[in-house]
Image: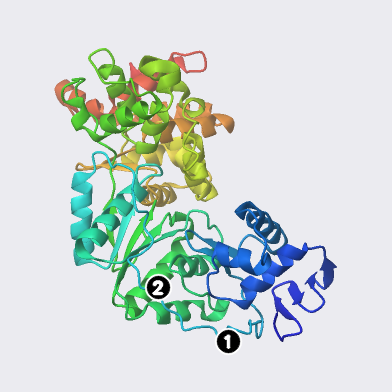
Amino acid sequence: MNEIAEWSFGRFVVQPERRRLLIDGEPTKIGGRAFDILLALAARRPRVVSKNELLDLVWPDVTVEEGNLQVHICALRKLLGADAIATIPGRGYQFSAAIDGPWPATPNEPLRAPESEIPARPGNLPLHLPSLYGRDADVAALKTLIGHHRLVSVVGPGGIGKTRLALAVAHELRQNAATAAWLVQLAPITNAALALATVARGLGLPIGSKDEALASLLDAIRGRELLLVLDNCEQLIPTVAELAHAILAGAPGISLLVTSQEPLRLPEERIYRLGPLAVPATADATTALDHGAVALFVARAQSGDARFKLDEDNVAAVVEICKQLDGVALAIELAAARVPLLGVHGVQQRLDERFPLLASGSREALPRHRALSAALEWSYGLLSDDERHVLDRLGIFVGGFSLEAAQELVADERIDGWMALEHLSTLVDKSLVIIDPGDPPRYRLLETTRAFALQRLAASAAIASARRKHALALVAWLRSQGFKKSPTQLAASMAADIDNLRAASAWAIGPDGDRGIAIELA
């Protein structure tokens, strides 16, 4: 099939004439069909080989099911690693490992790889996108931003709807402005070394050697005009930032739309912080559907039960569910999926147990979007130990908190007040702490994030000491305010922290509380 006696990649050596695969110098067992597939893909590297072509090459003059091919591809990936053979959706398979030295060629295909270029087609976006609820203003604002800047990042908490918004905008730009738009999903990639290869594969490009991967990618896209959507980048921030900087400098026709839980922090970057879906202030069945959170809930509930409708009997419960879930799209979808089983009121009554309740997402979703707890575990896993320490303790606050209160609560022998400030800033960047506008600003956790943080704090057995510090911080604040203001002024300044004061008082008079602190709070 080729004239090269043997060729290698990484730990592997292929000996075509002897039909042997060596791993670390030792022969390994490999099926005949799997070996033929390996030779066929490697010989045609970097071209994508369609499934039909592979079937014709490996099973000539024999009719077989496509499932046979998939079985052998899986077997090869188990031997060679998941990244050795890439699946290019809608096109076929590509041998994606970097081969050491010359690689095999078929008689009809030259040894020299073809010139790298992006296929001349409008991109790889899905033809049909799921409906987008309550995001018309966001779509318009984001389109305007992309029209004026080459690097735009959509930033927000996990599950808030960043990907759907970015795809909707890219889809409209492709249709209305004839802009080629390419999507690269980075969610499955946790190894930064694989990021460039993933981007190249997403664009249908060959993958250069490790040392030349960035340069070869820039050579391939230089002179082209397209929108590149890099989706779910938060676990690869330094690598994606380096890539974005290189593309901005070396490929002037490329615009970048990034989705992430935190910004890339590049000077050229424009950040669009995506807020939650709108929740109505009142439970009015005639106007509630004008709000994105309720419209999404109803649509997802109807997908599970076509008879479901919003009416005067259930609108208050639906609005309360959307409110307690902070207008976060993922949480609302997971809650609505439970309606056929529990009914709207049953879902509302069980929101105190939201993590086991909201654990039945779509099979087509990312694994971390199939359960609310999984989405938060993903975000939590990207934090440093000190950032987790701070986030857990911020869960004690109810409703919101000031910067000074956060420093008072978090500071200890491990983290001083200034480090607490730095970690709070990082948590804001990572979309785990929300800033409420004002002078001075106040901060808060989304209720679901707060529930998760309290769960982690309880598991660490530190919740009792954190509640005591929370109450003492409020006592200290009240002392500082009480001698400076009239009772009317004091009551006004306390309004923002009334929920914190009530929570601290409830702890102080409880079985694990402190009667002295309770008296001072009273």
Image x and y of residue 238, in percent: 45, 65
The amino acid pointed to by label 2 is: Pro
Q: Is residue 229 left or right of residue 25?
A: left
Relative vertical location of residue 138 with respect to residue 151 in this rendering, above or below: above
- Does the image show residue 452? yes
User: Residue visible at 44% across and 17% down?
Assistant: 342
Quarter of the image where one finds residue 475? top left
Per the image, the residue denoted by label 2 is 119
In the picture provided, is 264 more to the left or to the right than 140?
A: right
Q: Residue at x 48, y 45 (%)?
A: 366
- Residue 161 against residue 240 in the figure, above or below: above
Question: How busy is the neighbourhood of tag 2: few (under 14 within 10 Å), some, or many (20 plus)?
Answer: few
Residue designated by label 1: 110
- Front residue of 247/486: it is 247
Tell me residue 94's x, y (percent).
56, 68
Question: 249 or 360: which is nearer to us?
Answer: 360
Asked which secondary structure carries label 2, the reply is loop
Q: Residues within 10 Å of mark 1 (few under 14, many from 20)?
A: few
The image quadrant where one finds the N terminus is bottom right
Indicate which disc residue 225 carries: none
Residue at figure coordinates x 57%, y 76% from the top left = 210
In this view, 445 is above or below 146: above
State the residue in front, 116 or 286: 116
- The amino acid pointed to by label 1 is Pro
Q: Earlier in the sequence, mark 1 or mark 2?
A: 1
For the question of whether residue 412 can be seen, the reply is no
Where does residue 283 sit, x and y in percent of width and height?
21, 20
